[in-house]
Amino acid sequence: MAVHYVPTLYSVSYHIEAIQRNLDWAHIPAYDYYLPSRVNFTHAHAALYDPLSNVSTDFGIREWISKGFPASKLVLGLPYHGYAWTLVNPNHNGIGAPTSGIAMTADGSMSYKYIKWFLRSYGATSMYNATYVVNYVTIGTTWIGFDDVQAIRAKISYAKEKKLLGYNVFQVSNDDNWALSQAAQDDDKVHHKKQELLIKILVPIAVLILVAGSIMCCYSRSRVLKAIGTRNLGKISLHEVGSKSSGVENFNSNAPNLRVFSFAEIKEATNNFSFENKLGEGGFGPVYKGKSQKGEEMAVKRLSKTSNQGAEEFKNEVTLTAKLQHVNLVRLQGFCTEGEEKMLIYEYMPNKSLDFYLFDPTRRYFLDWTKRIAIIEGITQGLLYLQEYSNFTIIHRDLKASNILLDSEMKPKISDFGIARAFQKDEHEASTGRIVGTYGYVPPEYVRRGIYSMKYDVYSFGVLLLQIISSRRNSCTYGLSQNLNLLEYAYELWKEGEGMRFMDPSLDDSSSSCKLMACMQVALLCIQENPDHRPTMLEVSSMLKSETAAMPAPLRPAFSIKSNEDKLSVNDATTSSQQNILSVNDATISDLVPR
């Protein structure tokens, strides 16, 4: 029997005792709470949680249980569909953003299969919101909310935690290549396999312990301590981890020692990885806030099974981050590699990440121009250290707003070195056949030919700088015809002498030596098509600090849809005619890993 998600609706209530006595189970269709045909704002139509209202699955489940209906008779409904809204303003595209109506279909409904096809067509990637447990994506003025693999896994875990009878799906035919069904099934398989494995190994282990006795204990003591993660709080050298890490074999200096955490420690510190302790989720996996027994706060990144990253990226991040020490880089405290778990333990950043403020219509006001100047300077100094002042040249390859964390004083720290690469000081560039990174921050030479150098991070910095001065996303389109990406929109306004129209109107640079227009010109120089035309970070730092330095006029940015009307030198013109320097952002990026 299907029931409403709450047992009492207005003045009408279900007869709980009768349902419990006569039915084996009650099915809760936990979806379609918000529809674009009914509300004029975006929302999670199947929200597991909602901090602002009682319209959520968790609230309904708890209401049913509090009325006396047993959790063991409740079946959770999972939706294999989503809904599309039309945004009033593409720049305001979070949950709760104003909308003007339905998008895509007659009622806005879209099957999961249709949504995934639509995302692939545009090369777009959905965002995961752990607060509501929903995925969403914005393409132009279209906003789509739905449950992807992350949301389905979270809801399956919730059903098990609440000891519900089970879950059902509406509808299986909406699945895309069995992705959602497999995500739910894998979770069950892992649970059952662990039980079977436990039974199979308990008796042999007991026998072995009795037979081997003290000999086995002495022989394997060091390995056992490492495997079970006992509370030996000593230090461990990164030699074992770093020596196998791809791309950093040439590091000859000894890495600083890191603490090895046991799984039990992290589990206790994060309150068993509770939802309340979850800070967010990225390409690596979920991030949790933790607190040690001594009261020290930490951030725990836990590699998820669905992550695009793996052992190589994990070892790479451990080795690189441990070797880098700078006030504008997040400090790695330790790691955990117990069993199949891979976790990184960082210093805790209480003010979240830069994107949390920049792209929120209310929180962006907290970042006045003085704060943003300090953030720009901090990011610049962090990149200068990576490129110029560390023992090796480090190419981050994933510089973006969500990877800029903010400490208690709002000082920026660059994080996430999973796909970073190290160069010897006499090396200038390298190439790869595996294209990774974040759509919108990746330079054209990397997308087309897999070439990366210091100018890769300069390009990403330019995109980020445009976002800092404008509070605009680079996933939206702009201009009168809504056909320009963020980079070209900025260039067009700058060329027309209307650059201030690009800026966040809340910013006032009248009392600052660092001017918005100067930052805009530096950013445009950083995002030029040809990497040789982009400045170095040393030059960027100099231009940002100088009030009188003469700066060259930037050429049209990469991934432009218009022809280059700028005047090039003879040499540049010859080169551009051979290489067809202007591009449209339609390069093959099927291997690009959005994060």
Image (cartoon, rainbow, N blue to C red):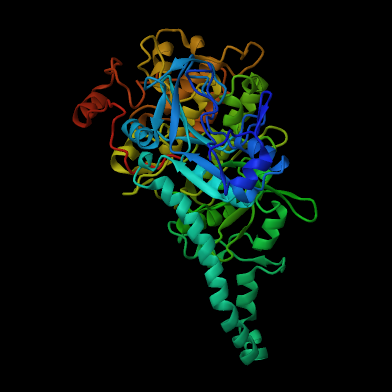
Q: Is the residue 197 above or below the residue 279 in the image?
A: below
Q: Specify the quadrant of the image occupied by residue 510.
A: top right
Q: Pick whichever, 10 or 466, lies toward us.
A: 10
Going 31% across and 49% down the picture, which residue do you hit?
433
Going 50% across and 21% down the picture, which residue do you hit?
472
Q: Residue 287: in sight, yes or no? A: no
Q: Specify the quadrant of the image occupied by residue 448.
A: top left
Q: Position of residue 513 (x, y in %)?
A: 62, 17
Q: Pick whichever, 449 or 505, lies toward us.
A: 505
Q: How many marks?
A: 0
Q: Is the residue 343 above or below the residue 138 in the image?
A: below
Q: Position of residue 319 (x, y in %)?
A: 54, 57
Q: Viewed as shown, does residue 248 lie left or right of 336? A: left
Q: Viewed as shown, does residue 259 lie left or right of 146? A: right
Q: Viewed as shown, does residue 519 lie left or right of 533? A: right
| Residue that protrudes farthest toward the right in the picture | 294
Q: Position of residue 408 (x, y in %)?
A: 72, 36
| Residue that protrudes farthest toward the left in the picture | 578
Q: Position of residue 174 (x, y in %)?
A: 37, 38
Q: Residue 429: in sight, yes or no? A: yes
Q: Pick whichever, 321 or 295, lies toward us.
A: 295
Q: Specify the quadrant of the image occupied by residue 247.
A: bottom left
Going 59% across and 19% down the picture, which residue do you hit?
361
